[in-house]
Amino acid sequence: MTLLDRYIAGEIAKAFVLVMLALVFVFSVLDLIKQLDDVGSGSYGFLDALLFELRMLAPRALDLLPFGALMGTTIALSLLAHRGEIIAAQAAGVSELRIAWSVLKSAILVLLVAVLLNEFVISELHQEAARQRSLSLSGSLVTRVDGGFWIFQGNRLIHINQVRHGRVPVDIDILEMDETRRVNLFIHAQQADVSDPNRWLLKDVLVKRLKGPTLASERIASMHWESYMTTDQIGLLELPPQTLSPTQLYDYVRYLRGTGQETSRYDLTLWQKLTLPIAVVVMVLLAIPAAFGTPRSTSVERRVIAALAAGLLFQIATQVIANAGLVLQLPPALTTLVMPVVTAVVALVLLRRVRS
């Protein structure tokens, strides 16, 4: 990196970090207030709510990355322009395109780190936060052991050894007891489809029934089983799609398609994750025109307010188009790319105007 690249990257980094800290703090406090409604449910206390918010810091920062990139870049470039440093660079023979490329290089570096963290670190933190919250809300009826779960339901005891793709229970043991607490039914399933939370479809099943002194065994390809699980207990098994990494989502979508199940909601979430890097680059591109023009023709405050409005419009429009796409059954690739493409066109038009 040249001296110019390092200087611009440093200025953007300072503004970006401050903006992200402020955004994450505000949204975390707002969500903590919302979490207080659940305090007292099961064993969920204020400390649990606080720990949940701490675990959610990194996932929340990732969600806010496009907006933070827009605001941080706009603030940094507006200050550079206001101090006349952009004009000084141009007077020294540095073109607008060269300055824009310096800005984009900084964004791409941050983006690569974020993508790697999302795949290997952030998604794990998000899943852990969701599971621990559901575990606490479930109270003493659920115990977690070595990554699996023991769930107590009256005369039934359920053990789930593992949850694949964030939503598919595997290696399941179900024990039913009579009034003397003696086991009279044992069911082992290799896997379960929990798309209907109250009526599981167990697959590759071994059933053992105690009839008097006789133990009868039977193997069944699949069978339905009434789970009677609470919403919070189901939350341990069915992680929201937003908590999964892109790779996990892709694997889960393939699993759903292989079993003939609906995938539209998961397809949309997968494409939202895949297009996040594009959204960040587009937001930075939209901020670049703030560096050019007459330094004092537009105040820093007005440029920041304009960026704030643009960022909010982008977020709202993206969500509206995504929801409309689900209703109208449009391809998720189309609905997730509409706003980044439109915004990129607007950014390029603005860049062309400031260069002319």
Image (cartoon, rainbow, N blue to C red):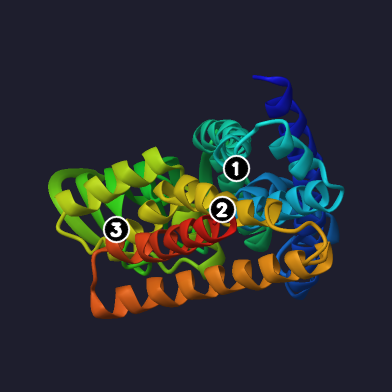
Residue at screen point 77% across, 30% down = 7
Q: Quadrant of the N terminus?
A: top right
> Is residue 219 something one can see in this rendering?
yes
Q: Position of residue 270 (x, y in %)?
A: 37, 52
Q: Position of residue 234 (x, y in %)?
A: 48, 61
Disc 2: CA contacts within 10 A as few (<14), some (14-19) or many (>=20): few
Q: CA distance from mark 2 to mark 3?
A: 33 Å
**Up-down relation of residue 203 to residue 201 (above or below):** above
Labels 1 and 3: the sequence-earlier one: 1
Q: Position of residue 285 (x, y in %)?
A: 55, 51
Q: Which mark is residue 355?
A: 2
**Up-down relation of residue 351 to residue 17 (above or below):** below
Q: Quadrant of the C terminus?
A: bottom right
Labels 1 and 2: the sequence-earlier one: 1
Labels 2 and 3: the sequence-earlier one: 3
Q: Give the camera-side residue of 182 and 146.
A: 146
Amino acid at pointer 3? Ala
Residue at screen point 47% across, 61% down = 349
Q: Position of residue 130 (x, y in %)?
A: 60, 53
Residue occupied by mark 1:
96
Give the structural element (helix, strand or loop) at label 2: helix
Amino acid at pointer 1? Glu
Residue occupied by mark 3:
333
Residue at screen point 23% across, 46% down = 254
Q: Give the camera-side residue of 228 and 303.
A: 303
